[in-house]
Amino acid sequence: MTEALKNLLKILDLELLEQQVYLGQSLDLGFHILFGGQVLGQALVAASRTVAPDKSIHSLHAYFLRAGNATQPLYYEVDLIRTGKSFATRRVVAKQGGLAIFSMSASFHHVEVGLEHQVAPMPVVPGPDGLASDQQLMQAYQQQLPSSRREKLTADRAIEVRVVDPVLPSNLAPRAPVRYAWIKAAGKLPADPMIHQAVLAYASDFGLAMTALQPHGRMFMDPTLQLASLDHSMWFHRPLRADEWFLHAMESPIAGSGRGFNRGQVFTPNGVLIASTAQEGLLRTKSPKS
């Protein structure tokens, strides 16, 4: 287990301050602002801790309201909207400096046996073996990274991401808005299913918004762009292990009005669909600093 993964598990272990109020620490990944996946993962942990263990998350719908500060802790307030026999609904608000920066509705379901089908086939793409990781690519192109962010962006990761045909400074030609990334935790995770769900929520924010940049031949480091997650939704279809490889197949069907819409499907290596994602991100053009 990498030190970065240990740190991620540490910040996912929220501190209970009072009834349904939790304290979470922050990690600076080099983006200057708080990584949205962190808030998603921590909010899911906070909500899960107020639900009986016989129910697990099946969907969440979140809004990023303000940019978070990666050097300050967060306070998560959980509202017990409803607790029924089969379903439980929770609302979570994350605050910094007394201001709400994030809100999420989450629904938990008691596992049932019922009808099953899957019509979505897993894309035929190369497996993770032999693909370069995001960390390796950042290290290879580190001289083109902003000096103030270079150390953080090239450091060890809690999550290993290996993108099929990644967008690099050397191949910025426009391409289809489709992105495939193999992802897993950088080490063995505890057995608790909630931890695997929270780590998947955390990892699901890597690269999803950037899919909308591909038809325009742009990267997230472009100084003429302002990028930010606006909302994020997930549906958890089947049990999962976030410390084993899974494929996040992403696409961006539309962008406009300063926003890019993206959606994804998460598959195990043998083609089982375990989760679905959707996100709209800010895609604003601006003048570069002189």
Image (cartoon, grey):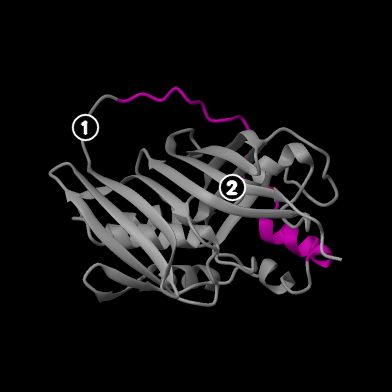
Q: Secondary structure at mark 1?
A: loop
> In the picture shown, does residue 239 fall above or below 200?
above
Residue at 17% over, 41% down: 86
Segment tinted magenta in the rendering: 116-145
Q: Which residue is mark 2?
A: 281
Q: Is any atom of residue 162 visible in this view?
A: yes
Is residue 140 shown in magenta? yes
Residue that label 1 marks: 113
Is any atom of residue 189 visible in this view? no
Where is residue 222? Give x, y as percent: 77, 55
Q: Residue at x 58, y 57 (%)?
A: 160
Q: Amino acid at mark 2?
A: Gly
* Side of 193 where 121 appears, left or right: right
Say left or right for 157 vs 150.
left
Element assignment for label 2: strand
Magenta-drawn stretch contains 193: no
Tell which of 281 and 200 is nearer to you. Answer: 281
Mark 1 closeness class: few <14, some 14–19, many ≥20 residues within 10 Å: few
As drawn, 99 above or below 206:
below
Question: What residue sits 56% from the left and 52% below the top?
Answer: 229
